[in-house]
Amino acid sequence: MALEFGKIEKLYIQAYKDPDLNEPVGGKFYALINPETYTYKYKIEFCDTQAPGTSGVALKFNKMPPQDFNFDFLFDRTGAFKDAATENSSVSSLTVAEQLDDFKKKIFEYNGEKHRPNYLKIIWGTLLFKGVLIALDIEFKLFKPDGTPLRAIAKCTFKGTVTEELRVAKENSQSPDITHERIITASDRLSLMTHNIYNNQDYYTDVAAFNRLDSFRKIKPGERVLFPRID
Protein backbone atom coordinates (compact mmCIF):
# COMPACT_ATOMS: atom_id res chain seq x y z
CA MET A 1 0.00 0.00 0.00
CA ALA A 2 1.42 3.39 -0.99
CA LEU A 3 1.84 6.00 1.71
CA GLU A 4 -0.13 9.22 1.36
CA PHE A 5 2.27 12.08 1.96
CA GLY A 6 0.87 15.51 2.63
CA LYS A 7 -2.63 14.29 3.51
CA ILE A 8 -4.35 16.78 5.78
CA GLU A 9 -5.53 15.28 9.06
CA LYS A 10 -8.37 17.13 10.75
CA LEU A 11 -8.52 17.87 14.46
CA TYR A 12 -11.47 16.09 16.03
CA ILE A 13 -13.19 15.73 19.39
CA GLN A 14 -14.78 12.56 20.71
CA ALA A 15 -17.11 12.68 23.71
CA TYR A 16 -17.24 9.92 26.34
CA LYS A 17 -19.54 9.05 29.23
CA ASP A 18 -16.78 7.84 31.55
CA PRO A 19 -13.47 9.32 32.82
CA ASP A 20 -11.54 6.30 31.48
CA LEU A 21 -12.76 7.22 27.97
CA ASN A 22 -14.09 3.75 27.21
CA GLU A 23 -17.74 4.63 26.43
CA PRO A 24 -17.98 7.00 23.44
CA VAL A 25 -21.05 9.19 23.00
CA GLY A 26 -22.09 9.80 19.40
CA GLY A 27 -19.66 10.32 16.56
CA LYS A 28 -16.50 12.36 16.26
CA PHE A 29 -16.77 16.10 15.68
CA TYR A 30 -14.18 17.30 13.15
CA ALA A 31 -12.94 20.85 12.81
CA LEU A 32 -13.97 22.57 9.59
CA ILE A 33 -10.38 23.78 9.30
CA ASN A 34 -7.52 23.05 11.67
CA PRO A 35 -6.68 25.76 14.21
CA GLU A 36 -3.76 28.07 13.48
CA THR A 37 -2.67 27.84 17.12
CA TYR A 38 -3.58 26.14 20.35
CA THR A 39 -2.39 26.96 23.86
CA TYR A 40 -1.62 25.00 27.00
CA LYS A 41 -1.69 26.87 30.30
CA TYR A 42 0.06 25.41 33.34
CA LYS A 43 -0.07 26.74 36.90
CA ILE A 44 1.55 26.05 40.25
CA GLU A 45 -0.25 27.39 43.30
CA PHE A 46 1.49 28.36 46.53
CA CYS A 47 0.16 29.44 49.91
CA ASP A 48 1.37 33.02 50.44
CA THR A 49 -0.41 34.01 53.65
CA GLN A 50 1.72 36.70 55.26
CA ALA A 51 1.62 37.81 58.87
CA PRO A 52 0.93 41.53 59.50
CA GLY A 53 4.06 43.63 59.92
CA THR A 54 6.35 41.24 58.01
CA SER A 55 8.28 42.08 54.85
CA GLY A 56 8.14 38.70 53.17
CA VAL A 57 6.90 35.14 53.35
CA ALA A 58 8.24 31.68 52.55
CA LEU A 59 5.95 30.30 49.87
CA LYS A 60 4.60 26.83 50.60
CA PHE A 61 3.55 24.55 47.79
CA ASN A 62 -0.21 24.05 47.66
CA LYS A 63 -1.14 22.22 44.45
CA MET A 64 -0.70 21.94 40.70
CA PRO A 65 -4.12 22.45 39.08
CA PRO A 66 -4.92 20.58 35.85
CA GLN A 67 -3.68 22.32 32.73
CA ASP A 68 -5.98 24.47 30.59
CA PHE A 69 -6.13 23.98 26.84
CA ASN A 70 -7.44 26.67 24.47
CA PHE A 71 -8.22 26.81 20.78
CA ASP A 72 -10.86 28.17 18.39
CA PHE A 73 -13.38 26.29 16.24
CA LEU A 74 -14.58 27.92 13.01
CA PHE A 75 -18.16 27.55 11.75
CA ASP A 76 -18.88 28.85 8.25
CA ARG A 77 -21.71 29.04 5.72
CA THR A 78 -20.14 31.44 3.21
CA GLY A 79 -18.91 28.61 0.96
CA ALA A 80 -15.28 29.69 1.36
CA PHE A 81 -14.39 26.37 3.00
CA LYS A 82 -16.70 24.11 1.00
CA ASP A 83 -13.99 21.52 0.32
CA ALA A 84 -12.92 21.40 3.96
CA ALA A 85 -16.11 19.88 5.39
CA THR A 86 -15.64 16.33 4.09
CA GLU A 87 -15.50 14.63 7.51
CA ASN A 88 -18.59 16.42 8.87
CA SER A 89 -20.56 15.82 5.68
CA SER A 90 -23.87 16.43 7.42
CA VAL A 91 -22.65 19.77 8.74
CA SER A 92 -21.77 21.26 5.35
CA SER A 93 -25.46 21.75 4.48
CA LEU A 94 -26.40 23.24 7.86
CA THR A 95 -26.70 26.88 8.81
CA VAL A 96 -24.16 28.29 11.24
CA ALA A 97 -26.75 28.15 14.03
CA GLU A 98 -27.45 24.49 13.24
CA GLN A 99 -23.73 23.69 13.12
CA LEU A 100 -23.31 25.26 16.55
CA ASP A 101 -26.25 23.26 17.91
CA ASP A 102 -24.63 20.06 16.64
CA PHE A 103 -21.31 21.07 18.21
CA LYS A 104 -22.84 21.93 21.58
CA LYS A 105 -24.93 18.76 21.62
CA LYS A 106 -21.77 16.62 21.31
CA ILE A 107 -19.26 18.70 23.25
CA PHE A 108 -21.03 20.99 25.68
CA GLU A 109 -24.42 19.75 26.79
CA TYR A 110 -25.33 17.99 30.04
CA ASN A 111 -25.42 14.17 29.90
CA GLY A 112 -28.63 13.24 31.72
CA GLU A 113 -27.57 9.61 32.10
CA LYS A 114 -24.35 10.54 33.91
CA HIS A 115 -25.66 13.78 35.49
CA ARG A 116 -22.74 15.80 34.16
CA PRO A 117 -21.24 17.03 30.86
CA ASN A 118 -19.28 14.48 28.85
CA TYR A 119 -15.56 13.79 29.09
CA LEU A 120 -13.66 14.68 25.92
CA LYS A 121 -10.67 13.51 23.94
CA ILE A 122 -9.09 15.89 21.40
CA ILE A 123 -6.79 14.44 18.75
CA TRP A 124 -4.76 16.08 16.01
CA GLY A 125 -1.33 14.93 14.84
CA THR A 126 0.82 14.59 17.96
CA LEU A 127 -1.84 16.32 20.07
CA LEU A 128 -3.78 14.12 22.49
CA PHE A 129 -5.73 15.95 25.17
CA LYS A 130 -8.16 14.42 27.67
CA GLY A 131 -10.42 16.68 29.68
CA VAL A 132 -13.67 18.60 29.85
CA LEU A 133 -14.98 21.81 28.34
CA ILE A 134 -15.15 24.54 31.00
CA ALA A 135 -15.83 27.67 28.93
CA LEU A 136 -17.30 28.42 25.51
CA ASP A 137 -17.45 31.90 23.96
CA ILE A 138 -19.09 32.21 20.55
CA GLU A 139 -18.29 35.21 18.36
CA PHE A 140 -20.44 35.80 15.26
CA LYS A 141 -18.49 37.48 12.45
CA LEU A 142 -20.34 37.73 9.12
CA PHE A 143 -24.06 38.14 8.44
CA LYS A 144 -26.62 38.11 5.66
CA PRO A 145 -28.58 41.34 5.11
CA ASP A 146 -31.39 39.86 7.22
CA GLY A 147 -29.00 39.26 10.16
CA THR A 148 -28.54 35.50 9.68
CA PRO A 149 -24.97 34.63 10.77
CA LEU A 150 -22.66 33.26 8.09
CA ARG A 151 -19.59 32.68 10.22
CA ALA A 152 -18.87 32.11 13.90
CA ILE A 153 -15.84 31.32 16.01
CA ALA A 154 -16.21 29.19 19.12
CA LYS A 155 -13.46 30.04 21.59
CA CYS A 156 -13.06 26.92 23.72
CA THR A 157 -11.31 26.41 27.03
CA PHE A 158 -10.79 22.84 28.23
CA LYS A 159 -9.38 21.58 31.51
CA GLY A 160 -7.37 18.39 31.72
CA THR A 161 -8.58 15.45 33.76
CA VAL A 162 -7.02 12.16 34.84
CA THR A 163 -8.38 9.16 36.71
CA GLU A 164 -7.41 8.81 40.36
CA GLU A 165 -5.22 5.78 39.58
CA LEU A 166 -3.28 7.67 36.91
CA ARG A 167 -2.91 10.72 39.14
CA VAL A 168 -1.31 8.62 41.89
CA ALA A 169 0.97 6.90 39.38
CA LYS A 170 2.08 10.24 37.93
CA GLU A 171 2.81 11.78 41.31
CA ASN A 172 4.83 8.75 42.44
CA SER A 173 4.29 10.08 45.93
CA GLN A 174 6.87 9.35 48.63
CA SER A 175 4.59 10.46 51.43
CA PRO A 176 4.84 8.35 54.62
CA ASP A 177 1.07 8.47 55.13
CA ILE A 178 0.40 5.96 52.34
CA THR A 179 1.54 2.35 51.99
CA HIS A 180 4.47 1.76 49.64
CA GLU A 181 5.59 -1.42 47.93
CA ARG A 182 9.17 -2.07 46.84
CA ILE A 183 10.89 -4.96 45.09
CA ILE A 184 14.27 -5.62 46.68
CA THR A 185 17.42 -5.50 44.54
CA ALA A 186 20.89 -6.79 45.42
CA SER A 187 22.12 -3.32 46.43
CA ASP A 188 19.15 -2.38 48.62
CA ARG A 189 19.43 -1.94 52.38
CA LEU A 190 16.25 -1.97 54.42
CA SER A 191 17.45 0.79 56.75
CA LEU A 192 18.20 3.14 53.84
CA MET A 193 14.90 2.35 52.10
CA THR A 194 13.09 3.03 55.37
CA HIS A 195 14.88 6.37 55.72
CA ASN A 196 13.97 7.37 52.14
CA ILE A 197 10.28 6.72 52.74
CA TYR A 198 9.79 7.82 56.35
CA ASN A 199 12.75 10.20 56.66
CA ASN A 200 13.67 8.13 59.70
CA GLN A 201 15.55 4.83 59.52
CA ASP A 202 14.51 3.84 63.05
CA TYR A 203 11.34 2.31 61.62
CA TYR A 204 13.24 -0.45 59.80
CA THR A 205 12.65 -3.00 62.58
CA ASP A 206 8.92 -2.26 62.42
CA VAL A 207 8.99 -2.73 58.66
CA ALA A 208 10.78 -6.06 59.08
CA ALA A 209 8.19 -7.17 61.64
CA PHE A 210 5.29 -6.03 59.45
CA ASN A 211 6.66 -8.13 56.56
CA ARG A 212 7.52 -11.07 58.88
CA LEU A 213 11.15 -11.03 57.82
CA ASP A 214 13.42 -13.43 59.68
CA SER A 215 16.35 -11.06 59.26
CA PHE A 216 16.40 -7.57 57.79
CA ARG A 217 20.03 -8.17 56.77
CA LYS A 218 19.22 -11.19 54.60
CA ILE A 219 16.44 -10.06 52.31
CA LYS A 220 16.56 -11.86 48.97
CA PRO A 221 16.62 -9.84 45.73
CA GLY A 222 13.21 -9.93 44.08
CA GLU A 223 11.40 -10.13 47.41
CA ARG A 224 8.41 -7.80 47.84
CA VAL A 225 8.47 -5.52 50.89
CA LEU A 226 5.62 -3.33 52.08
CA PHE A 227 6.21 -0.09 53.95
CA PRO A 228 2.96 0.60 55.86
CA ARG A 229 1.52 4.05 56.37
CA ILE A 230 2.24 5.92 59.58
CA ASP A 231 -0.91 7.09 61.33
Image (cartoon, grey):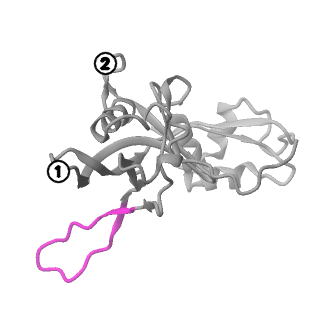
Residue at 33% over, 70% down: 59
**Dot 2: what SS?**
loop
Q: Mark 1 points at which residue?
A: 145
Residue at 29% over, 47% down: 135
Crowding around mark 2 (Cα neighbors within 10 Å: few <14, some 14 to 19, many 20+) is few
Q: 184 or 7: nearer the eye? A: 7
The residue mark sitting in front, 1 or 2, is 1
- Please identify the quadrant where the C terminus is shown: top left
**Dot 1: what SS?**
loop
Residue at 85% over, 42% down: 218
Q: Is residue 201 visible?
A: no
**Residue 46 vertical placement versus 65 (above, below):** below
Apparent side of residue 53 relative to residue 46 in the rendered image (left or right): left
Crowding around mark 1 (Cα neighbors within 10 Å: few <14, some 14 to 19, many 20+) is few
Apparent side of residue 129 relative to residue 41 in the rendered image (left or right): right
Res 112 label: 2
- Please identify the quadrant where the N terminus is shown: top right
Instruction: Give the mark, 1 or 2, whose residue is nearer the N terminus.
Output: 2
Residue type for callout 2: Gly
Apparent side of residue 89 relative to residue 116 in the rendered image (left or right): right
In x, y percent, where is residue 137?
A: 26, 50
Q: Which residue ends up furthest to the front in the rendered image?
A: 145
Q: 166 or 84: nearer the eye? A: 84
- What's the magenta region? 43-61
Residue at 27% over, 75% down: 57
- Looking at the magenta stretch, what is its main secondary structure? loop
Please identify the quarter of the rendering in which residue 223 is found: top right
